[in-house]
Image (cartoon, grey):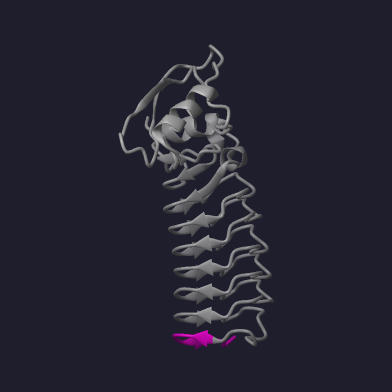
Amino acid sequence: MRVNIINSSSNTNFNKYLTKCNRPKPHSIKLDNISFKAKNDSTNDKIQFKLNHFVPELRSYQAYRIYNAYGINLQLTKDGKIILDEFRQPDENTSFADLGINETHLLEDVIEIKGDADFRYSKATKLCNIKKIGGSANFEDSRISNLGELEYIGNNANFEHSKVVNMGKLNYIGGDGKFSYSKIEDLGELTEIGKNADFSYSSEKNLGNLKIINKNADFRNSPVRTLSKVEYIGGNLHCEK
């Protein structure tokens, strides 16, 4: 397994940092190799560690072992936070919860998901400290009700049949926004949807600060009564009941 620690300091300082942080792990943990590499290290030296040496800042130790076991690549920041390449369940027929893993705990130290985040059938209840999802986010049939610190979704966002009620700090969806049959009543700080917006058969009564829908907008059979703050719709508008 390779884990990158993001660090802009010199090679000497980086080595001192790692030396200072070494701590033994409990003997019950099976040993494995990790390769640490300073991001801006001009010598490209790799420092090998056994997993019986613990870096205290990596409070998410168990989490990255689990992600690695199921082929989810990640990076670790200097302060022990996690940046995932993607988020998904172990496979189509098995969830983390089926394996006895608390998904909310699994997400606690994640601050970013670079690619897609598939929360379908997830037993997590909140996104904790995740601020950015670079790809699509699918919340259909998940238990997530709280988007936490999430501010940005780079591609499609599917909230159909989800338990999310309020969009919280989310201010941008880069692709389609699917809200039909969702429980969301307030779009909160959301200001722009990059493509189509589907509010048909939704629960939204308040569009909050939504200003821009770059393609089609479908409000058929929705409780929305006013588009007063919407400044631009780039495609067709459907409002019939």
Residue drawn at 53 percent across, 74 percent down = 192
Q: Is residue 107 above or below residue 53?
A: below
Q: Is residue 217 above or below residue 129?
A: below
Residue drawn at 65 percent across, 81 percent down = 224
171 and 36: which is toward the camera: 36
104 and 82: which is toward the camera: 82
Q: Position of residue 1 (x, y in %)?
A: 37, 30
Q: What quarter of the picture does the C terminus occupy?
A: bottom right
Main SS, magenta residues:
loop
Image-based side of 154 in relation to 126, left or right = left
Q: Residue furthest top?
A: 27
Residue drawn at 49 percent across, 17 percent down = 52
79 and 183: which is toward the camera: 79
Q: Quadrant of residue 10?
A: top left
Q: Which residues are magenta?
A: 232-241
Query: How many callouts does the rendering have?
Result: 0
15 and 146: which is toward the camera: 15
Q: Is residue 141 magenta?
A: no
Q: Position of residue 176 (x, y in %)?
A: 46, 70
Q: Position of residue 3 (x, y in %)?
A: 41, 34
